[in-house]
Image (spheres, rainbow, N blue to C red):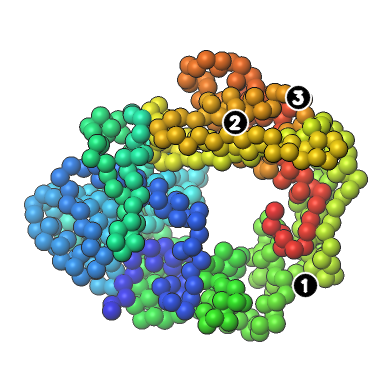
Amino acid sequence: MKRYLTKSRFKLGLECPTKLFYTKKKEYLDQKIEDPFLKALADGGYQVGELAKQYFKGGYDIADLDYDLAKQKTDELLKKENVIVFEPAIQFENLFIRIDILIKRGKCFELIEVKSKSFDSHEEEPFLNKNGTLSSSWKPYLYDVAFQKYVLQRAFPDSTIATYLMMVDKNAKCPVDGLNQKFRIVRDQSNRKGVRVSSCLTEEDLKEKILIQVPVDFYLEKIYQEKDFEGFGRSFFETVSFLAEKYEKDEKVKPQIGSHCKKCEFQCSIEEEQQGFKNGFKECWSEVLGWSDADFKEPTILEIWNFKNKDRLIKQGTLKLREVTLFDINIKPNLKKPGLSTTERQWLQVKKAKERDSTPYIDARGLKKEMDQWKFPLHFIDFETTAVAIPFYKGLRPYEGVAFQFSHHVVYEDGTVEHKGQFLNATPGEFPNFSFIRALKKELDQDEGTIFNYATHENSFLNYIYNQLETFQIEGREELKAFIKMISKSTGKSVEKWEGKRNMVDLYDLVKRYYYDPYTKGSN
């Protein structure tokens, strides 16, 4: 079977060329395939892709997975003078792409790549930094469509191509209730995911578009003109040829180890290795460093929490925590808050590894000072929320937060713990945020006890709901807004600034400053 460089493999090769040798081989487990968060993101992408098709009436959908069959059907359709094709298969030599939406008018093509990423249509120049270089957050999307345009141009050299990204417009408002539910995630008989579009989808549903089509040819030219594309020492076109040749011949590119290795998806556990699976991460590091199995049992600098200088240490040959020095960490105290600074905590992690000390660190005195400010009973809250590309409700913007569940636990002064209350709205079609905040107010209004959360999620969603209360006219709106301001603080993007007298205590912040357990290996 011919080995083509596709756009997903091109993206993988840009992350790390060595990964092209590991991908799609049964002996190398791919951890990303099992990642539930990535699966959820993919579901949203499927829905957005299907919504985009609804904006182009009369298009032909090529659903075949077989490369040859899909290309054969594409070639037949592109013989038409004018045609719209969804998922056409375009092949040139050892390059192969499936374009989301391709519009052909004579010898002119419109290539449209659909992404579920949000786009600010009010921002003047979102793709560029102030110095005129491409924004790092947009590079993966622009590289993706640059690769597609290149392949299409080589396959049809006499054509002209206009290239677009179609994305979720963060300033658009959903025109109707229930739009998300009209694009259901389903599986076919072979367990392949897809989207079933409701027969009840109407012109009114599509009248106000929540996706925006943005021309990007100007930015692609900047990519094509780079002489050292992404540090490969080659142009964009030369990099494509290099990766395509290596993949086609199944040749392993010599590994370049670095901090990026921490997130390598081709790692596996000792138990999985014993079952016969191979560990791509270990193979790379063994090849470059000459390490044995014993070396991998020692903690490495990849584990250091929130440490930005991993690549510098790797270049100087410092790989294991026991080799790290005080000079490498460059300790600086925390002048704004009591407790451990970031660098002090990093050194604590290194020091415990060097001394093989597995006991937890607790700054009991500092933690006691914090606890002395708390008022009993103590309230612990946890939210469950969603933020989807295609909104559930009329008037909401894409990715606007929906809070549908919370749990509330109380710790009394005598040490008693009680599951005090909860909220869950699972009624389809019912916007839960305002009943959610009313229920939370009822739970927390009984006393003046201190309220706790973990990290910023709960505070961010309270800000979401506050902004929604500004927009929607509901009974008791001002009272609910006052309650939110009392138990939260404004986020950085908020025009109005506040910090409530019962502002939630962030336990994540307390953990970082007063506690460390070596068994977490730097994770919090």
Cα separation between marks 2 and 1 = 45 Å
State the image coordinates of residue 76 (x, y, percent, origin top left).
Answer: 11, 61
Q: Residue at x 60, y 20 (%)?
A: 480
- Callout 2: few (<14), some (14-19), or many (20+) C-alpha neighbours within 10 Å? many
Against 11, is 106 above or below?
above
Cα separation between marks 2 and 3 = 20 Å
Seen in the image, is 43 located left or right of residue 420?
Answer: left
Image disc number at residue 323: 1
Tag 3 residue: 447
Tag 2 residue: 462
Q: Name the image quarter holding the N terminus.
A: bottom left
State the image coordinates of residue 123 (x, y, percent, origin top left).
Answer: 44, 35
Q: How many marks?
A: 3
Of circles 3 and 1, the one toward us is 3
> Secondary structure under badge 3?
loop
| Residue closest to the eye, 252 or 396 | 396
**Label located before the other in sequence (2 or 3):** 3
State the image coordinates of residue 29 (x, y, percent, origin top left).
Answer: 49, 72
Pointers 2 and 1 in contact (C-beta within 8 Å): no
Of circles 2 and 1, the one toward us is 2
Please name the amino acid that badge 3 sits on.
Asp
Please name the amino acid that badge 1 sits on.
Glu
| Residue closest to the eye, 49 or 152 | 49
